[in-house]
Structure formats: C-alpha cells, structure tokens
Amino acid sequence: MKISSLDDIGFAGRVVLLRVDINSPLDPTTKLIVDDSRLDKALPTIKELADAGARVVVLAHQGDTLDYHNLTSLREHATKLSSKLGRPVGFIDDVAGPAARAAIKQLGDGDILLLDNVRYLTEEVSTFEEGVKLSASDMTATYLVSNLAPLADVYVNDAFAAAHRDSPSMVAFQELLPSVGGRLLVQETNALTRIAADPIRPCVFLIGGLKVSDAFAMMSNVLADGTADRILTSGITANIMIAARDVDLGGPTMSFIAERSLDSFIPQAADLLSTFGDRIDVPIDFAFDEDGTRGEVDATDLPVDRLIVDIGTRTVARYERTIADAATLFVNGPAGVYESPAGEYGTRSLWNAVAAAHATSVIGGGDTVASARRFIDLSDISFVSTGGGALIRYLSGQNLPLLDAMERAAVRLESA
C-alpha cells in the first residue's frame, strides 16, 4: 500500500486542512470528555505541522446520527488540545460557513484552528452516506469541500479510526488538493499491513465482545486466507458457536441472542466450524451470574437457567497456554461482561496473559481498549489501534474508502 507521508511535501506558510479523529467518549450527563486518548494520538501530527510553519485547520467529528447522544460541539476538544500542545488552538463554532472561512484567511504561520463538528453538516453523517451514494468526485461539490478546498494548499488525513467512512471530509479533498497521510495514519496502516500480510507465526486471534457481525466477517476472512493460525472465541461469538453445535445454552442466554437477531449468525458459525473447526477454539466451560455471584458450568452440562456472562476457568487456562505460545496476537472484544464481578475473570485473565506474552500484540476498538485499560497497562501492548470498525474491516479484507483515496492521491502527487 502506497500512502504519501508528511515527509513527501513542504508545509511552511501553507494552509493545511488536517482531518483527525478525536471522537471521544462523553459523560452522559455533563457531556464532557471522559477519555482523551484519541486527542493524545492526534498531537504529533498537529505539532509537527505547526512547528513546520503550516497554517493548520483541523477538521474533526464528535458523535453521529447513530450516536446522537455524543453529537456535540468541539469547543472542549480545542481547549484540551491547547493544553496538551502548550500553545493556543483557536476554535470557531462554524464548520465551513462565512465565519470559518474568514478565520482561516486570518491565520498566520504556525497557527492552529479547530473548526466545529463536521457532523453538524448533513453530508457528513452516516444516514446521508448510506442513503445518498456519492463518488469522491461527486463529493467535491458538497458544502464542506467546495467552501474549504479553495482556501487550502494541502490536505492531510490522520484519521484511521474513521477510514471506513465514505464521506466528503475523508475522501473528497484528495480529488482537489495535494494529499498525504499524517504520522498516525501511516503508523496504523503499516502496523496492520504487517499483521494482515505477513504475521509472525503462530498468529492467534482472540475474538469476543458483542459486535458479532464484525467478528464473523473477520473470522471468515482470516481463516480462509491463512492470516490466523488459531482463533480463540469468547463472549457472544463463542455462545453462537456453541449454539451452532445444536447445544442449548439455556433460556436466558438463548433469549439474549434471539432478541438481538444474533441467531441469524448460527448458520455461518456452523459453516465456519465445519470448514475450519480444527483452528477455532470454543469454550469448554462457562460462567453465569447467580444473583451477583459467579457460578460455573461445564459445556457438557448445559443448558443453564442463568445468563452466561463469561468463559469458565478451565477455558481461561487453555487459552492462556495458547496465548503464551503465540508470536502474534490480535484481540478484539472482551471475553465477558467485564464490568461485573461475576463476569470479569475471563477478560482480566486473558488481558494479563496478552500483556505478559512475548508476542507482538495488536488491539483495537473502543470496548476492547477500555477493557484492556481496566486490567493492564496499555504500554504492555505492542500496538493499540484507534480504529474499531475500520480495524475490523481492514483485517476482514474489505476496502477502506480513506485508504483507497489516499492511494489515488499518492499517485497524483508522484506524477505532479
């Protein structure tokens, strides 16, 4: 994959549109940022551009129509960025209108300006993306791009976490401006390419959590193309695998699966087990929540009349041995309901095993990173991706609109 970087172009005195992903978890009551790790990840590129004398205009989003409770202004983000950088970061509560354009024209060399939430524009939200299919070329006529592109000299994208989004701020500026990847985008793409293309063997995937559609898409691909030597399943993914063997997990758990229409994945799970069963590990015991306390049941003694919330201790011990022998580890999703006393053992134990392993470890996804941070020091992980959906889709072999756009931009830059 060829993506041009900050090393391939000059920035002094030039207006740079920098698209970052600083979409952050918010307190549901105060609407204040409760985890600013994505802000930290954005700092190196912002600082490098400003230090080089660029006039940096930052584009970012917070929330979405599908995540409406987090759809807020970026004013606090600007304050936090300013504090972290130790230099002023201007903010204007406009995205691409007259006030934003006037503020951009007034920037001096080394200045930084954060525009307000791009998702305040209809053309940037997921419902528009899904309902109105536009090509990158068509998107150059959108309000955001047609208003901002004429004011800019260069476009830089550093937003891997949003790489699966086919929106104007992600793929259209590349059609009009010299475009390069920021430090984070290049770093994440290189790290994940190594995992996908040539992992050190044995390569073990730990798949858990609730996002079953992503999990099954990824498992199908990495097993078929040989990326994964072994997959350790947990969470709802594991429960569906067990159900695919015509095992009744028990009323509460089967209802949980059916009520969320996750039983539609049972046939796919059966196909995976039939084709790749020797490379897929499923739990041999489970934990259930019995009025706040942990109970365990062997897989051969199912069903159980309590909700399954975790993998059992024998499964954990078996998985720990596989993790210790791995050379590459990829983790997506916690092993159980790690927020509860009855369900935390599996997640805590597996994270400690991953942290202690000698393998190259890669993790990504909001709930994955949150669960890891709860039990281990993230510095014990080789690479923590900012991406969730983008990461899964990349490892599932799906094209990411941003990376396609950046590759096209690299060709244009080379021929310029």
Image (cartoon, rainbow, N blue to C red):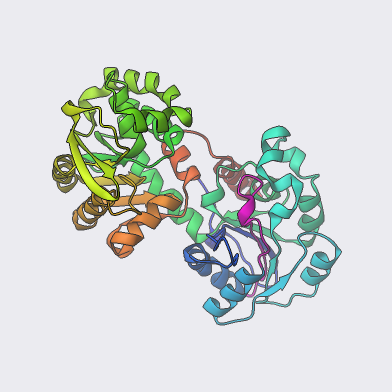
Asked if residue 193 can be seen in this view, the reply is: yes
Which contiguous range is marked in magenta? 52-74
Residue at left 52%, top 51%? 160
Look at the image and say whether residue 64 sits in the magenta stretch: yes
Q: Magenta includes 150?
A: no
Exactly how many numbered labels are in the figure?
Answer: 0
Q: Which residue occupies the extreme front position in the image?
A: 291
Residue 170: % across, % down? 64, 48
Q: Residue at x 69, y 52 (%)?
A: 119
Q: Residue furthest right?
A: 98
Residue 3 position (above or below residue 373): above
Q: Which image quadrant for residue 377?
A: bottom left
The answer to whether any part of residue 133 appears in the image is no
Q: Nearer the viewer, residue 326 or 107?
A: 326
Q: Position of residue 313 (x, y in %)?
A: 16, 44
Question: Where residue 22 sits: x, y (%)?
Answer: 56, 61
Residue 87 percent location from the top left of the image:
59, 81
